[in-house]
Image (cartoon, grey):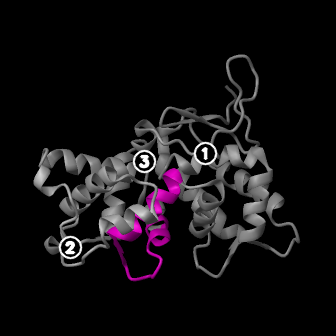
Amino acid sequence: MQARDKMVDGVRVPDANGKDPNQDGQTEDPKWQRPRLTRKSLMKCCLVKWIIASTSQQGPDSSDSDLELSMVRHQPEGLEELQAQTQFTRKELQSLYRGFKNECPSGLVDEETFKNIYAQFFPQGDATTYAHFLFNAFDMDRSGSIRFEDFVIGLSVLLRGSVTEKLRWAFNLYDINKDGCVTKEEMLAIMTSIYDMMGRYTLPSVRDDSPYEHVEKFFQKMDRNRDGVVTMEEFIETCEKDENIMASMQLFENVI
């Protein structure tokens, strides 16, 4: 393995060039663009692990298997409507809601909760900044809290959405000030927060200049008209056409 290759959640993350040599020294095809609908891939998501762990603590309770609208101050949309808006099954939505309600009885999750979740799953690093950025990406109406509906709709895109849907969501994360464009500084802030959170979790250890190298290489390819910003169209088109970038995007997928 080259010095720049890293392991994230048991998955080898390519370097800035997207290289991921296997044991024979050959480059594997990028896997990021193929959504996997398995329980194993679902459980790689930190937010899902947090929810399922809370559900397990409650123990099996068939009487609590449906959305109990009267039990929360903020009432979520009906189960059937959420099932139509997401790619989760009815049973998965029931499990997610039980855990969500147990952790957030009000029906709303705040930024501090996100910070606690990622501090728990990435204790080797500092997850504060990344959790802040991720929370803002879920908090579309800038209310300072996330409803269960928005939570599961976002998870559905990230875990089971199409390539384009995932890229739109990723662009929204990088677009920190929500002005419709991503600057090099914004992209660097997100990448740096990911590396800070992973800390010693990466093997070999990440060099201090690694986020900058990634951003320089990505931005040079994405900013086609050289105006200093990347639009959503430039972002999506470049990612979809560049296998190296798509492979490197696996870093993003493994820290949700």
Q: Residue at x 56, y 66 (%)?
A: 173
Which residue is tagged 1?
Answer: 250
Is 31 on the left-hand or right-hand side of 222? left
Q: SS at mark 2?
A: loop
Amino acid identity at mark 2: Ser
The question of residue 7 being in magenta is answered with no
Is 38 on the left-hand or right-hand side of 1? left
Q: How many numbered marks have been drawn onto this rendered protein structure?
A: 3
Farthest residue, direction top: 24
Q: CA distance from mark 2 to mark 1?
A: 34 Å
Is 59 on the left-hand or right-hand side of 251? left
Q: Are marks 2 and 3 in contact (CB under 8 Å)?
A: no
Pair 2/1: label in front: 2
Residue segment shown in magenta: 133-160
Local crowd size for mark 3, using a 10 Å CA cut-off: few (<14), some (14–19), many (≥20): some
Which residue is tagged 3?
Answer: 45
| Vertical relation: 3 (above or below) 254 | above
State which quadrant residue 152 falls in: bottom left
Local crowd size for mark 2, using a 10 Å CA cut-off: few (<14), some (14–19), many (≥20): some
Q: Earlier in the sequence, mark 2 or mark 1?
A: 2
Is 71 on the left-hand or right-hand side of 217? left
| Vertical relation: 174 (above or below) 203 | below
Amino acid identity at mark 3: Cys
Local crowd size for mark 1, using a 10 Å CA cut-off: few (<14), some (14–19), many (≥20): many
Q: Residue at x 42, y 44 (%)?
A: 42
Residue 110: percent from left, percent from top:
32, 71
Which residue is tagged 2?
Answer: 106
Q: Earlier in the sequence, mark 2 or mark 3?
A: 3
Residue 191: percent from left, percent from top:
60, 57
Residue 135 at least partly seen: yes
